[in-house]
Amino acid sequence: MATDVPSLRWKFPELLDKYGLTAYRIVKEIDNVGSMGAIYKLADESRQPARADFKTMAKIITALRELTGEDIQIQDLLEYYE
């Protein structure tokens, strides 16, 4: 029986670094102060959230696509590991 519990890891901080973006820039692009806390939490590797709101994730992906010109997908934000 495996002792490691499968989990997901947020890759949002890496995407921000890769494209030279900040959480603040994503919040501005989304234009939704209500998502600000969640976005800042996602951007901080030491405060990774245990759950996510699908609407916020969709907005983040849309903002990343618009700001980078890349076809960002959900797997660019999340990584499964055991």
Image (tube, rainbow, N blue to C red):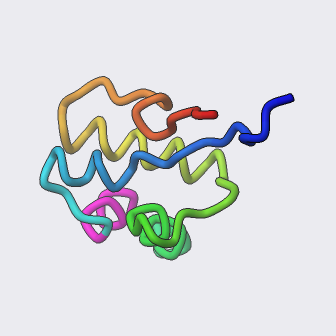
Q: Which residue appears farthest toward the left when viewing the image?
A: 20
Q: Position of residue 12 (x, y in %)?
A: 39, 50
Q: Which residue appears farthest toward the top when viewing the image?
A: 71
Q: Which one is in front, 44 or 34?
A: 44
Q: Could you tell me which quadrant the N terminus lies in?
A: top right
Is 74 displayed left or right of 53 in the figure? left
Is 45 displayed left or right of 67 in the figure? right
Q: Position of residue 29 (x, y in %)?
A: 30, 58
Q: Position of residue 82 (x, y in %)?
A: 63, 34
Q: Report the span colored magenta.
A: 24-31
Majority SS type along the magenta span: helix
Which residue is pictured at 42% across the width and 71% down the height?
40
Q: Which one is in front, 34 or 12?
A: 12
Is 81 in the magenta?
no
Which residue is pictured at 68% across the width and 59% down the height?
50
Which residue is pictured at 34% across the width and 46% down the height?
63
Number of numbered discs on residues = 0
| Up-down relation of residue 57 to residue 82 (above or below) | below
Which residue is pictured at 51% across the width and 75% down the height?
37
Q: Which residue appears farthest toward the right when viewing the image?
A: 1
Is 77 displayed left or right of 28 in the figure? right
Is 20 displayed left or right of 37 in the figure? left
